[in-house]
Image (cartoon, coloured by chain):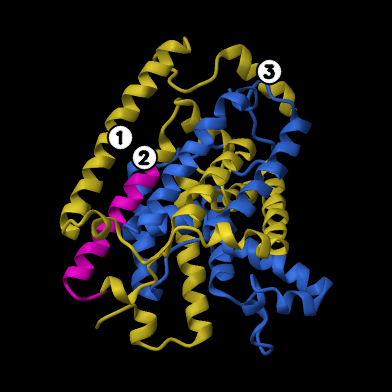
Amino acid sequence: MEGPLSVVLKFSHPVEMMISVVVGMGFGFALERGGFGRADNLVAVFYGRDFRVLRVMFSAIVTAMIGLYFLDVAGILPLSSIGIMDTFLGAQIAGGLLLGAGFVVGGYCPGTSIVAGVSGKIDALLFMGGIVLGSGAYTLSAETMAPLADSGAKGKVLLHEWLHLPSGVAVLAVALLAVGAFVLAGRVEAWVRVRAGLAATGAIAVPAHAAAEKERSLA
Amino acid sequence: MEEKRPYWNPYLAGLVLGLVLLASFVLTGRGLGASGTFKHLAAAGLHAASPTYAEENPNVARFFADPTRSSLDDWIVWLSVGTAAGGALAVFTARRFKVETVMGPRADRRYRWVLAVAGGAMAGFAAQLARGCTSGQALTGGAQLALGSWAFMFSVFAGAYGLAWFLRKQWI
């Protein structure tokens, strides 16, 4: 075979949608078990207290990247046969900055808010409502936003093409970058823990009085 | 009460998530995503209010191009249906479901709710501008080594770290 199964086997629309549901189930299950169903677990990364988000994300990217690399080299799933993300540098940098800001303001990103919403988190349900509002606002202002949305358009450019490197070198470099980030994250966590005066064994637990206060506020 | 199941080791969770993403590429040629579903929901709302406006808006017109099929009958919406189902399956089997507002020990609950809506609105607007969110851009494009997706990912961290200090009372 060559290319995605849905193309090779010419799946009908209902079959493809059913596959999407199954893939989504795996996605939601992994996010919840990874600890992404609560805002405090997620934003802890932005305060250097728990780099779980970075560890999960980078190991997921490296896993899928290595898989894609070998499937491409073997000719089973050529990269040209899948939907490569287009590059619009200006839009992606501006959108990324705003999405990051929304992440620390609201506590979630779109995917994690779905999982937190079904976990019973009221704040996540409100966040989801906010996404619909923001999304609708964009649609209403799409024409105004078009110059920014189309800025820095480069088409389908991959990191190694941009850096003029063989793809294998880029794959290896990204994997090493991830390992380096994991090591650095552990050091930062230890430093923040000492600095915040938290018990070395309690790791990321909040101090007792703060925990008690939180319990009260939730009651 | 029975004990909650602990979270997975983060590297294991990442490995599983990466394999789900890879399976998605192999099965359908698409990655993961979430923000597209919210765009569809907002568009369906606009369409209900004014069909002509929605059908002529260049941002969402294609959702309504096929009159024989609901605009919501799209792969990204089905993926999110699965995400909700998979998340629910995981949270209930781990005995972790709990109705609550998640916030820092010093935060005010009402203010937290306002910020949750505001943050969601920022994220919804931003994801449309960037053509994807943390899953659609950072994870999917990151694994493909797409240049713009990597720029997006670093920008997300920069935006969040840049604002974190001002929001510390909400979280720590």
Q: Are marks 2 and 1 in contact (CB under 8 Å)?
A: yes
Which colour is chain A painted? yellow
For label 2, the crowd category at 10 Å Cα-Cα, with few meaning under 14, some 14 to 19 and many 20 or more, is many
Q: CA distance from mark 3 to mark 2?
A: 30 Å
At x 21%, y 53%, the residue is A170
The stretch of residues the image draws in magenta is A55-77
In the depicted view, which residue is nearer to us: B7 or B23? B23
Q: Tell if the residue under mark 3 belongs to the same chain as the one under mark 2.
A: yes
When the figure is inspected, residue A43 is found, relative to residue B117, above or below; the finding is above
Q: Amino acid under label 3?
A: Glu
> What amino acid is found at the position of numbered circle 2 in the picture?
Arg
3 or 1: tag closer to the N-terminus = 1
- Residue closer to the observer: A7 or A216: A7
Residue under label 2: A55
| 2 or 1: tag closer to the N-terminus | 2
Question: In x, y percent, where is residue B15?
Answer: 32, 51
Judge whether residue A153 can be spotted in this image.
yes
Instruction: Indicate whether A211 appears above or below A41.
Output: above
Q: Which residue is mark 3?
A: A213
Parent chain of label 3: A
* Label 1 secondary element: helix
Question: Which residue does the numbered mark 1 point to in the structure image?
Answer: A182
Q: Position of residue A104 (x, y in %)?
A: 58, 36
In the image, which is nearer the foreground, mark 3 or mark 1? 1
Chain B representation colour: blue
Amino acid type at circle 1 is Phe
Residue B160 image point, x, y percent: 53, 36
The secondary element bearing badge 3 is classed as helix
Residue B3 visible in image: no
Task: Tell me the chief SS of the magenta region.
Answer: helix
